[in-house]
């Protein structure tokens, strides 16, 4: 049982980690909690659904090996990431940037609630409330070890999630954009004085955050289903992961996602599936009370 | 031609509430100019406006023969004007080396390493603390890093907001000696200072501001000995050089 908890927790945690990276970066850079971030997950998943239909005519829809999806979904994933990144930048440009100029922090948070509702309602209007699927094929589980099994879909997508997280970590550590993001997040005024275009860094952060959220949405859609509330339902685990890892820390968001994923998976056999969501809330409360800076954060 | 010129500059944080009022001044190459005056005189606002951090209401600013009026702060550093704020003037979460490399990134790639090495030569303590987080440096080391961070881009002009604030007297003297060394190296220096005695000792020229305007201007050393200036603007008593 423990082995299966680990498999379920780690695969789910990778999705949470991907989504939490964007949340923690925008929180750290702009100092506000974006409650619309979950909708980037939803939009990414549904955009990929649209794109698989469009690309299917070009690439064909044949699955790869024993997977339930083929190259079409992977190509759609890349395009959905690009488009969702652009959606995040557009949302910032049209809404949040204007409010930042007015300097009202609470207005940003409330606006993000409004944006979340609007984006979710748009998905409901376009795609209906019915669950949708990338594929109706049944994913067969493979045995990894005694008491541990996972579908090949889960394993492949987990591998892609790890590559994306590692790529993001390397980008933050070893590229000019990453250094600029770290610098602007720590001290935006000083960042300007060393020649960093902070407005461009903000756009880059929204773009990357939106793109990674879209990836989380596609992975969730491929392994479970697509629903208009799929991103909103993931919001609490995302916040818990970001706070647990330490606001602004990419490795922290990844580690936080894995821990939250494992804790949720452990809650199912221990307390029942209905309490799964409560675990994130408990972890969030515990971190805020005991270690507000999180695992990788720096205490003020 | 002056290195920096402001012409009838009016600037402030809020529309309709100018803090800097009609300031025209010039700074020559290889010159240290200190801005003095009581709190609220507009000294810091003036240099922040020049550095692109405070919006202008009206007026013009030129660096060499180019207008830099309205040029955003992140572009001014490429034009040769580097600014050191009073507080939070280093990236505390980055190492000393990362602070310098980050600032040097505006230079052409082949020049970056040489410029960082030049700063480590100018400030040997920083070379020894290259891998240390800037947040763990002492106050004096942090101020040196802030100055080195600004100088690493080889600017023509270095502008500092109260570089001696919070430092022990021995470190204040060290900072002022470094500023003189920087000036001798060919960089013009403009600084706002509350520590008038220390600043006037190294300044070629001093500008005294009162209520947002230039009230008095003269050679640094001469102001130290001017009893009227000392009485009115330098703390109510004659400064001891």
Image (spheres, rainbow, N blue to C red):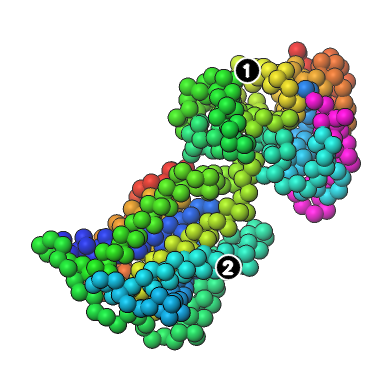
Specify whether B3 is left or right of B185. right
Labels 2, 1: one chain: no
Image point (62%, 54%), residue name? A199
In the rendered image, the residue lying farthest to the left is: A146
Can see residue B118?
yes
Q: Is residue B38 above or below residue A80?
A: above
In front here: A145 or A283?
A: A145
Question: Alpha carbon of mark 2 to alpha carbon of mark 1: how far?
Answer: 50 Å
SS class of the residue under badge 2?
helix
Instruction: Indicate whether A162 appears above or below B72.
Output: below
In the image, A247 versus B155, the foreground residue is: B155
Letter of the chain that mark 1 sits on in the rendering:
B
At horizontal 52% and vertical 24% (from top left) the residue drawn is B126
Closest to the camera, between mark 2 and mark 1, is: 2
Depth check, front residue: B64 or B45: B64
Please provide percent x and percent y for residue A219. Answer: 35, 68
Q: Is residue B18 magenta?
A: yes
Q: Where on the picture, by quarter, is residue B219?
A: top right
Question: Where does label 2 land, which residue?
Answer: A91
Which range is magenta? B1-29
Residue shown at 68% from the left, 18% from the top: B181
Which chain is indicated by disc 2?
A
Alpha-carbon neighbours of circle 2 within 10 Å: few (<14), some, or many (≥20)? some
Q: Residues within 10 Å of mark 1 (few under 14, many from 20)?
A: some
Does residue B237 appear anywhere in the picture? no
Say above or below: A298 vs A63: above
What residue did someone put label 1 on? B174
In which quarter of the view is residue B240 placed? top right
Q: Does the magenta stretch include residue B173?
A: no
């Amino acid at each position: 049982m423990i082995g299966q908890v680990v498999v379920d927790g780690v695969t789910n945690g990778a999705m949470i980690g991907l989504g939490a990276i964007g949340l923690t970066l925008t929180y750290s850079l702009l100092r506000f909690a974006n409650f619309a971030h979950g909708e980037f997950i939803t939009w990414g998943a549904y955009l990929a659904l649209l794109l698989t239909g469009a690309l299917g005519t070009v690439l064909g829809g044949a699955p790869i090996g024993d997977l339930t999806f083929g190259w079409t979904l992977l190509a759609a994933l890349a395009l959905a990431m690009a488009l969702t990144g652009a959606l995040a930048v557009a949302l910032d440009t049209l809404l949040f940037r204007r409010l930042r100029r007015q300097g009202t922090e609470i207005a940003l948070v409330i606006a993000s609630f409004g944006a979340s509702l609007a984006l979710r309602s748009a998905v409901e209007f376009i795609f209906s409330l019915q669950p949708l699927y990338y594929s109706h094929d049944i994913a067969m589980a493979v045995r990894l070890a005694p008491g541990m099994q996972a579908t090949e879909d889960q394993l492949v997508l987990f591998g892609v999630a790890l590559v994306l997280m590692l790529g993001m970590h390397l980008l933050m550590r070893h590229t000019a954009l990453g250094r600029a993001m770290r610098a602007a997040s720590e001290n935006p005024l000083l960042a300007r004085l060393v020649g960093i275009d902070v407005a461009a860094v903000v756009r880059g952060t929204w773009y990357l955050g939106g793109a990674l959220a879209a990836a989380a949405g596609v992975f969730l859609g491929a392994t479970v289903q697509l629903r208009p509330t799929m991103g909103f339902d993931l919001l609490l685990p995302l916040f818990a992961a970001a706070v647990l890892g330490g606001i602004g820390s990419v490795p922290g968001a990844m580690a936080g996602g894995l821990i939250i994923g494992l804790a949720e998976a452990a809650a199912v056999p221990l307390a029942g599936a209905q309490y799964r969501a409560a675990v994130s809330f408990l972890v969030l409360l515990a971190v805020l009370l005991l270690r507000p800076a999180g695992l990788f954060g720096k205490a003020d | 031609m002056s290195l920096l010129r402001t012409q009838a500059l009016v600037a402030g944080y809020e529309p309709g509430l100018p803090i800097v009022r009609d300031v025209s001044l010039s700074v020559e190459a290889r010159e240290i100019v200190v801005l003095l005056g009581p709190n609220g005189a507009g000294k810091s606002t003036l240099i922040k406006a020049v550095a692109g951090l405070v919006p202008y209401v009206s007026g013009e600013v030129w660096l060499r023969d180019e207008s830099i009026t309205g040029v955003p702060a992140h572009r001014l550093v490429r034009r040769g004007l580097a600014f050191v704020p009073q507080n939070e003037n280093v990236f505390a979460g980055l190492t000393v080396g990362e602070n310098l490399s980050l600032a040097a990134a505006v230079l052409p790639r082949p020049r970056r390493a040489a410029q960082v090495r030049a700063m480590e030569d100018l400030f040997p303590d920083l070379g020894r603390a290259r891998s240390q987080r800037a947040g763990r440096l002492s106050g004096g080391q942090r101020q040196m890093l802030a100055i080195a961070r600004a100088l690493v881009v080889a600017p023509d002009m270095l502008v500092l907001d109260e570089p001696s604030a919070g430092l022990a007297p021995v470190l204040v003297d060290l900072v002022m000696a470094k500023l003189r060394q920087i000036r001798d190296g060919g960089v013009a220096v403009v600084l706002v200072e509350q520590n008038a005695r220390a600043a006037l000792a190294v300044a070629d020229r001093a500008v005294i501001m009162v209520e947002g305007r230039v009230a008095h201007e003269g050679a640094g050393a001469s102001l130290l000995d001017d009893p009227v200036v000392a009485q009115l603007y330098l703390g109510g008593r004659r400064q001891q050089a």
